[in-house]
Structures are given as structure tokens and as C-alpha cells.
Image: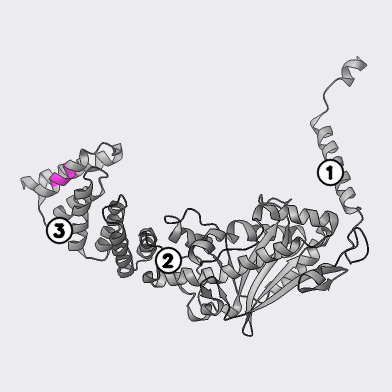
């Protein structure tokens, strides 16, 4: 009987207690692990200290020393094909009109912080640290990049405390994919460090979203490095691939050799500089479609969609017409005509909308019901030509790919038209 009892599987409670005990043992091992001295000449690393390799200073926070790299650039510096100071010559209110953030009104560059993080992984879970947080801002004619480095994971709270003090000076924030990654991660790290994340609750321009809306149809990728190369004419030299950055940081924690971290600082600085010039470029593209970077027509098409969604019909029409000129006789022409026709219809330019629908039918009469139904609506309600309206509705009914719901709507339209013809 005793043998039978001893062979019984452990209870769920026993397994939970064993798991908690094991986690406590791991945490104790990490917390009690001796931290190597990071000053040159002592400990496992006998070379130069980080402040001798990378321009910056150690800041004392509570009982810890936090390294902050600092580098200033003259605002006239050209990053790629755009000067940093050009941000003073644009109105960032346009981003509020795009619905990026309703509070992005009255944005001034001197009140804006550009943020990018380097992390120990891309999962974003509670085990992922933002070991480096770079911020960029304009100050007295310079663009300054400050980079906060967590020299030891045990000093995370102190690093975030210093970062929190810096961020409290700003009213607006710009990032690239920050809404989905950087800011949620930083917020989690603030909370786990028992610090308020309120400094992150700023009106936030995440450039990934307008960049995708403009260039997803004309570029293979909307990664920041690809946007730099294709749009800003910037080719990075001796940059470290982003996927290698966590490995470099973990190697530093083991050896205390900061030499390879220099390339991580460089990578992060370039990202932050690009945030400034990409902000300027996105603004230029949306406010002046003639400033197009691409000549395949899809960039203009995407800009037209943005203006159409915002009710800026003149700008939308100009973009779609430019797209048509670039895409004439291509498979894209039909789709461009569709949105050009919607622009004309919504702005009351019925004759131009009518021509666009006819052109669509001439290109491909069986692709979709859209132009046929629009023609049927026009002839029924505007011209009162019920015979022609019924003709176009019947053609729509003959398209193979229509859904049962659409079939029912067309049949209802045809019955209504038949009654009108009999009156």
C-alpha cells in the first residue's frame, strides 16, 4: 500500500510549489552574483572604461552609476538628403489631421523628443529589457542625442529614474513602431521597477503608420533601414545588424568589454537622426505630392487615398491623376480609376466621375460590379434614364464573383427600375 501511495503522481499544488521554489533559487543566484568591476585596470576587463571609448558621462543615481552618451549635431547637418533644421519649416499639425493623434496640434520641434530603444529581444515580454534608450531633441541650435545604457541589469530602476527625469521636459514624442513595441516595453519596465510611466503618455507620432500608408505599395519593405536607403539616399556604413545587438549586449555583461557596444550606440544614433528626417519627408509628401520620391505611380496613388480619407478632394484628385499618368495601360490603372471616380463623386463632379466609370468598364467590364452599379445609380437618379440604368444593373448581375447579398441588392434594383419604366 505504501508502495502504491509513493508511486502516485504529485499534486498540482506540489508542482506549483516546486516551480516557485525553483524560480526563487534562480532569482537568488542572479541577485547574489558578484558584479565585475567596470573600471579599467581591475576585474576581468583590463581595458578602457566605457566613458573613455564613447563620449558621455557617468551619472550617480542613488547608489548606482548610469552611463549616458551624449552627442550634439549642428542643426544644419544633412542626414541623407534632408537637413535636420528643416523640421522648423513645416507644420506638424498635419499629423493631427491625419488622425495619427488628436492632440498633435501646436507641436513645436523644441518640445518634441525622438525615441528609440535597443532591447534584449523582440518578444516584448516581461523578460525583455530595454538596455539602451536613445532620445533626440533640439537644444540651442543643435540636435542632441542622449543614450542611456543599463551597465548592469540590476541597475534598471536607476537608469529608468534618470530617463524619466529627462522625458518629463517634453510635450510630444516621435518613434518608429513605438506604439506597438518601444513604448509598451518601456511602460512595462517602468511598472516592474515601481516607477510611474506617466512620462510616456505624450501625444505620440509613430512614423511607421504614415510610412506604410504612403510606401507599402511602392517599396519591398517599410523597415526603417530600407526607407533610409530608398527615400533618404542614406546607405549605412559599418552598421551592426539589429538582430545581433542583443548578443553584443549579453557579451558585454559577461566580459565587461565595452568595445563592441560602440557600434550599438552608432546604430541607435542613426535611427534617431532618421526619425527627424523621415518626419520631414512624410510631411513634404502629404502636403506637396509633386515632391514624390518614387516614379511608379503607386506613391501618388497612396497619397491620393490619404487625402480622400481626409476629405481633401482637390489634393486627392491631383494625386490620382498623377498616378494614372504613370500607370496608364497597366494592371493598376483600373484600381486608380476607381478611387479617382469616388473622389469626383464625393466632390460633386459627376461628369468626371461618369467618365471614370465608363473607362473602367472599357478596361475590364467583368472585373467588379462597382463601375456598373455606379453607372446604374447615375442613370437612375441623375439622368432618369431607367432603360440604361437597368442595362448596367443587368450586366452587374452577370458577373460571376458577386456574393448572394449583392445579387439580392441588384435584383431589388432591377425590380424598382422595372416599376419606374412602367409608370
Q: Which residue is mark 1?
A: 23
Residue interval drawn in magenta: 390-394
Tell me whether the residue at label 2 lies in contact with that at label 1, contact meaning CB atoms closer than 8 angstroms: no
In this rendering, the answer to whether 375 lies above or below 114 is above
Q: Is residue 392 magenta?
A: yes
**Residue at (28, 61) in percent of width and height:** 325
Residue sitting at the far front: 237
Which residue position holds label 2?
293
Q: Residue at x 49, y 81 (%)?
A: 89
Disc ID at residue 280? none
| 180 is within the stretch colored magenta | no
The residue that label 3 is drawn on is 382
Q: Give the structural element (helix, strand or loop) at label 1.
A: helix
Q: Is residue 31 left or right of residue 364?
A: right
Q: Earlier in the sequence, mark 2 or mark 1?
A: 1
Q: Residues within 10 Å of mark 1 (few under 14, many from 20)?
A: few
Identify the residue at the far bottom of this view: 140
Q: Residue at x 37, y 59 (%)?
A: 296
Q: Residue 301 occupies which quadrant of the picture?
A: bottom left
Crowding around mark 3 (Cα neighbors within 10 Å: few <14, some 14 to 19, many 20+) is few
| Residue 345 image offset from top left, x and y in percent | 24, 61
Q: Tag 3's secondary structure?
A: helix
| Image coordinates for residue 252, horizontal then vertical, percent | 80, 57
Tell me the quadrant of the picture where the N terminus can be found. Answer: top right
Tell me the distance, in whole angstroms, between the alpha carbons under discs 2 and 3: 41 Å
N-term mark: 2 or 3? 2
Q: Nearer the viewer, residue 11 or 377?
A: 377
| Mark 2 Cα shell of 10 Å, populated few (<14), some (14-19), many (≥20) | some
Amino acid at each position: 500500500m505504501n508502495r502504491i501511495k509513493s508511486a502516485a503522481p504529485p499534486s498540482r499544488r506540489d508542482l506549483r510549489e516546486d516551480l516557485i521554489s525553483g524560480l526563487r533559487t534562480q532569482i537568488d543566484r542572479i541577485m547574489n552574483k558578484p558584479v565585475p568591476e567596470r573600471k579599467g585596470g581591475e576585474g576581468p576587463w583590463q581595458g578602457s572604461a566605457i566613458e573613455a571609448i564613447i563620449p558621455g558621462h557617468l551619472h550617480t543615481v542613488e547608489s548606482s552609476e548610469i552611463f549616458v552618451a551624449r552627442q550634439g549635431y549642428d542643426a544644419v547637418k544633412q542626414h541623407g538628403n534632408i537637413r535636420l533644421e528643416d523640421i522648423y519649416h513645416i507644420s506638424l499639425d498635419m499629423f493631427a489631421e491625419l488622425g495619427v493623434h488628436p492632440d498633435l496640434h501646436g507641436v513645436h520641434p523644441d518640445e518634441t523628443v525622438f525615441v528609440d530603444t535597443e532591447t534584449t529581444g523582440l518578444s516584448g515580454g516581461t523578460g525583455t529589457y530595454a538596455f539602451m534608450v536613445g532620445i533626440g531633441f533640439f537644444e540651442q541650435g543643435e540636435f542632441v542625442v542622449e543614450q542611456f545604457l543599463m551597465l548592469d541589469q540590476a541597475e534598471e530602476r536607476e537608469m529608468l529614474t534618470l530617463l524619466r527625469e529627462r522625458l518629463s521636459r517634453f510635450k510630444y514624442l516621435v518613434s518608429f513602431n513605438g506604439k506597438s513595441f518601444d513604448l509598451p516595453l518601456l511602460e512595462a519596465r517602468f511598472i516592474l521597477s515601481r516607477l510611474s510611466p506617466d512620462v510616456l503618455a505624450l501625444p505620440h507620432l509613430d512614423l511607421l503608420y504614415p510610412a506604410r500608408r504612403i510606401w507599402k505599395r511602392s517599396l519591398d519593405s517599410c523597415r526603417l533601414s530600407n526607407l533610409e536607403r530608398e527615400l533618404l539616399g542614406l546607405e549605412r556604413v559599418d552598421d551592426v545588424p539589429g538582430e545581433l545587438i542583443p548578443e553584443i549586449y549579453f557579451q558585454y555583461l559577461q566580459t565587461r568589454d565595452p568595445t563592441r557596444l560602440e557600434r550599438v550606440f552608432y546604430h541607435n544614433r542613426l535611427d534617431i537622426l532618421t526619425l527627424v528626417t523621415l518626419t520631414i519627408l512624410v510631411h513634404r509628401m502629404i502636403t506637396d505630392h509633386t515632391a514624390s520620391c518614387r516614379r511608379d505611380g503607386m506613391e501618388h496613388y497612396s497619397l491620393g487615398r490619404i487625402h480622400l480619407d481626409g476629405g481633401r478632394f482637390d489634393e486627392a484628385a491631383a494625386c490620382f491623376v498623377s498616378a494614372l499618368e504613370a500607370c496608364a495601360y497597366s494592371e493598376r490603372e483600373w484600381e486608380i480609376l476607381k478611387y479617382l471616380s469616388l473622389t469626383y463623386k464625393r466632390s460633386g463632379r459627376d461628369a468626371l466621375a461618369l467618365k471614370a466609370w465608363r473607362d473602367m468598364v472599357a478596361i475590364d467590364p467583368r472585373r467588379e460590379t462597382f463601375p456598373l452599379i455606379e453607372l446604374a445609380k447615375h442613370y437612375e437618379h441623375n439622368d432618369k434614364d431607367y432603360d440604361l440604368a437597368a442595362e448596367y444593373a443587368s450586366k452587374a448581375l452577370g458577373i460571376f464573383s458577386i456574393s448572394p447579398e449583392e445579387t439580392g441588392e441588384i435584383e431589388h434594383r432591377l425590380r424598382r427600375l422595372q416599376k419606374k419604366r412602367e409608370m
